[in-house]
Amino acid sequence: MLRNVIASRFGKAVLFERGWCRYQFHKKSTLQLALHAMKYEGLYNLGTMFGFQLGEWMLSSGGIGDIECIVPVPLHRLKKIERSYNQSEKIADGIGKSLARPVMRKLLVRKRYTVSQTGLSAEERKKNPEGAFSVAKGVTLRHVLLVDDVVTTGATLAAAASALFQAGVEKVSFAALAVAMKD
């Protein structure tokens, strides 16, 4: 499902090793309410719980291969101050517990402030995160699991993966709680 959503918007331009996505996201659903509470109302423990369940599901669906670490999609420092935490970090923490892999919060940095993807057109969503990420120097990892909360177009994951590839990471896999479905 995740591969199809990203391929439908980017073609084969975004190459990733494996992809896991546990839920389909629909507007005005119970899942939307839960994710909104996690992201904006401080119920970050939901992220850890969802992440743990996602990690368990990943293990039961054929394993994780040679993934070395888990990297949450970072928020810009100003947005993190505004929210007080990064929901993708909480999800990554839960996945890390399930997979027994380290979560590397400082490997990837959002160096440029980007507006929220919510409400943007598909084309605007594609351009918004381009060039927004940088990677810590001296990366020697071969395979990274990149984690986000909800994938709509895959633009954020694509931009973050691009930075990882440019830094020398050989393989990037994606995990997200949900993929947005067209209602």
Image (cartoon, grey):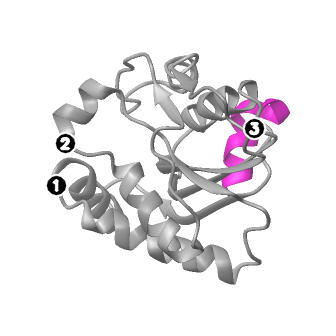
Q: Is residue 3 magenta?
A: yes
Q: Does the magenta stretch include residue 133?
A: no
Q: Which residue is identified by label 2?
A: 84
Disc 3, disc 2: CB below 8 Å?
no
- The residue closer to the viewer here, 83 or 24, is 83
> Residue 90 — which label?
none
Three-letter amino acid code at disc 3? Val
Image point (55%, 72%), residue name: 55
Disc 1, disc 2: CB below 8 Å?
yes
Magenta span covers which residues?
1-13
Cα distance, mark 3 to mark 1? 33 Å
- The residue closer to the viewer here, 60 or 102, is 102
Image point (56%, 23%), residue name: 134
- Badge 3: residue crowd in 10 Å (few <14, some 14–19, many ≥20): some
Q: Which residue is identified by label 3?
A: 169
Q: Quadrant of the N terminus?
A: bottom right
